[in-house]
Image (cartoon, rainbow, N blue to C red):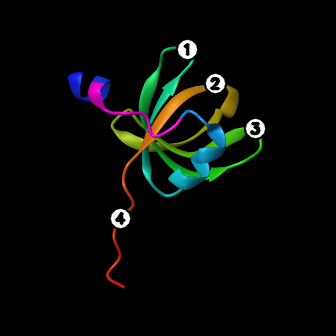
Amino acid sequence: MRYMEEMPFYGQNLRGLDNCIFRFTYMWLRNGDNFWFFLTAVGHERAYGYRFFGGRWNQYSIALRNIDAYHCSPPTPTPY
């Protein structure tokens, strides 16, 4: 877990989550839980996407008030 401790936060401003849509994002929740999340949409109160658990990606949503911090992977380069 040393890698995760050294990784800088992408942001703690939840409106910045829009920049993470369609990217793998590591989430830290206020309850101490943390996990990989593939973000597909951000609403006024919830973030929607897929969470990796049980050996597969499952649909999941998170209340924005429960997110403490997050870090997005860099965007995937396109050939054009």
SS for dot 2: helix
* Residue 9 magenta-highlighted: yes
Percent position of residue 14, x then y: 63, 38
Which numbered dot is residue 45?
3
Residue behind mark 4: 76
Q: Which segment did they paint magenta?
A: 6-11
Q: Quadrant of residue 66?
A: top right
* Label 3 – label 1 distance at C-alpha: 17 Å
Residue type marked 1: Asn
Residue behind mark 2: 66
Of the two numbered discs 4 and 3 on the same chain, state the one appearing first in sequence.
Answer: 3
SS for dot 4: loop
Q: Which residue in the rendered view is the most extreme toward the top?
A: 31
Disc 2 and disc 3 in contact, CB within 8 angstroms: no
Depicted 23 relative to depicted 59: above or below: below
Left or right: 60 in relation to 52? right
Pair 4/1: label in front: 4
Disc 4 and disc 2 in contact, CB within 8 angstroms: no
Residue type marked 2: Asn
* Label 1 – label 2 distance at C-alpha: 8 Å
Left or right: 24 in relation to 65? left
Which numbered dot is residue 31?
1
Percent position of residue 62, x then y: 62, 34
Of the two numbered discs 2 and 3 on the same chain, state the one appearing first in sequence.
Answer: 3
Left or right: 56 in relation to 68? left
Residue at 75% in and 38% down: 45
Residue type marked 3: Glu
In what quadrant of the picture does the N terminus appear?
top left
* Label 4 – label 3 distance at C-alpha: 27 Å
Total numbered circles: 4
